[in-house]
Image: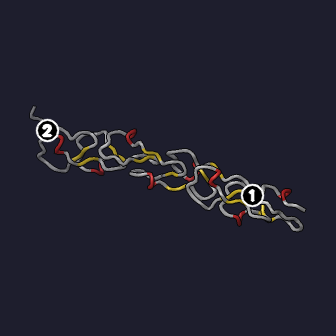
Amino acid sequence: DNQCKLCSAGRWSAATGLTSNDDCQGHCSAGKWSDQTGRSADNQCKLCSAGRWSAATGITTADDCQGRCSAGKWSDQTGRSADNQCKLCSAGKWSTATGITTDADCTNLCSAGRWSAATGLTSNDECEGRCSVGKWSDQTGRSSDNQCKLCSAGRWSAATGITTADDCQG
């Protein structure tokens, strides 16, 4: 068999005159994959989809992009090679889901009476801020104490994290 053969899936080579598949030195770089043979450049490899990543090189299927943005993170970009390239859910939000592709997918909100300026949260317990004394909030997804409402004139509260105006003493 004197026919020229193609570099195998996940590999590539720009060189000519190769004598074995092992000479196809290029591997699809991290965050990329290829199920096609005979590739001549890394830019011919396909990108791992949004919300997924791969640190491995030379992978041959989209399923090999096994990394998913971890809980509290998301990515709308393709071709990621590590979880730290995923973005953090914005302040006042949290998520336990993995592999999500937009900040809107961070659907859990800090509960009423709580808030968090931190990003990348994975549970409501991490919403450590509580509306301070003299304030309350019945709204979710708050990112600062300034978003809590003040007890009305003639009313007060020594408690933190209250969720209704009726919790303010009169």
Instruction: Find the residue positioned furthest to the front.
Output: 158
Secondary structure at numbered mark 1: loop
Which mark sits nearer the N-terminus, 1 or 2? 2
Residue type beneath disc 1: Gly
Q: Colour scheme of this structure image?
A: secondary structure
**Alpha-carbon neighbours of circle 2 within 10 Å: few (<14), some, or many (≥20)?**
few
Tell me the residue that label 1 is attached to.
161
Image quadrant holding the C terminus, namely: bottom right
The location of residue 107, given as percent across then percent down, is: 62, 48
| Quadrant hosting residue 116 | bottom right
**Alpha-carbon neighbours of circle 1 within 10 Å: few (<14), some, or many (≥20)?**
many
Distance between the alpha carbons at the discs numbered 1 and 2: 72 Å
The location of residue 153, given as percent across then percent down, is: 87, 68
158, 62: nearer the viewer = 158
Tell me the residue that label 2 is attached to.
4
Secondary structure at numbered mark 2: loop
18, 96: nearer the viewer = 96
Does 47 sit left or right of 141 as displayed?
Answer: left
Residue type beneath disc 2: Cys
Does 95 sit left or right of 113 as displayed?
Answer: left
Does 48 sit left or right of 164 as displayed?
Answer: left
Whether residue 34 is situated above or below residue 103 in the rendered picture: above
